[in-house]
Image (tube, rainbow, N blue to C red):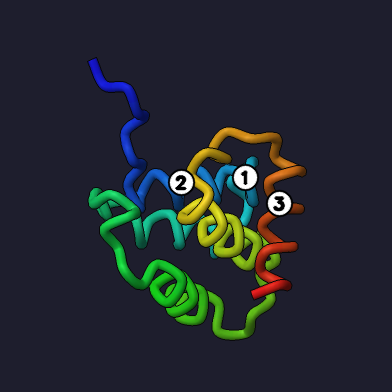
Amino acid sequence: MPTEPQTPTLAQIVRAAVETADPTGADDAATQLLTRFEDRDEPVTAVGDVEEQLFEARGAIDLDGDSEALTTAVAVATYLAHRRDQIGSDREELIRLATRAEDVA
C-alpha cells in the first residue's frame, strides 16, 4: 500500500489549472492549452522546463495576449507544478496564490 500520493502528470496539472481558470469552458484559448497538454502523461516532476513549456504554449495560443483565462491557467499550472499539494484547493484561493507567486518570480 503506497504511503505517498502519486505524483500528478503534466496533463493532470494543466487540466486542474484550466478547470480553475475557466470552470465553464467558455474560453477557447484555455481549452487549446488543455488540448495541447492532454497527452502529456509523464509525472510533472520529470518535466525539467515546465514553466518554459507553459509560457511558450501561451504565446503560441494567444498571440495578442488578451485571454485572461489562459494567462490565469498558465499561472495556476506553473504554481501547481511546484505546489502539487494544492490541487483541488478553493478556486479563488488557488488563483490568488498562483498570481501572487507569479508576481514574486
Instruction: Pinpoint residue 72: horizontal percent, then vertical percent.
Output: 65, 61
Instruction: Tell me whether the residue at label 3 lies in contact with that at label 1, contact meaning CB atoms closer than 8 angstroms.
Output: yes
Say which label, 2 or 1, has the lower sequence index: 2
Helix, strand or loop at label 1? It is helix
- Label of residue 15 in the image: 2
Task: Return the residue nearer the eye: 90 or 69.
Answer: 90
| Quadrant in the rendering for residue 47 | bottom left
Instruction: Answer few, some or many: residues within 10 Å of disc 1's Cα (few below 14, many 20 plus, some between 14 and 19).
Output: many
Instruction: Tell me whether the residue at label 3 lies in contact with that at label 2, contact meaning CB atoms closer than 8 angstroms.
Output: no
- Label of residue 95 in the image: 3
* Left or right: 36 in relation to 28: left
Instruction: Answer few, some or many: residues within 10 Å of disc 3's Cα (few below 14, many 20 plus, some between 14 and 19).
Output: many
Q: Quadrant of the N terminus?
A: top left
Q: CA distance from mark 3 to mark 1?
A: 8 Å
Q: Amino acid at mark 2?
A: Arg
* Left or right: 7 in relation to 16: left
Disc 1 marks which residue? 20
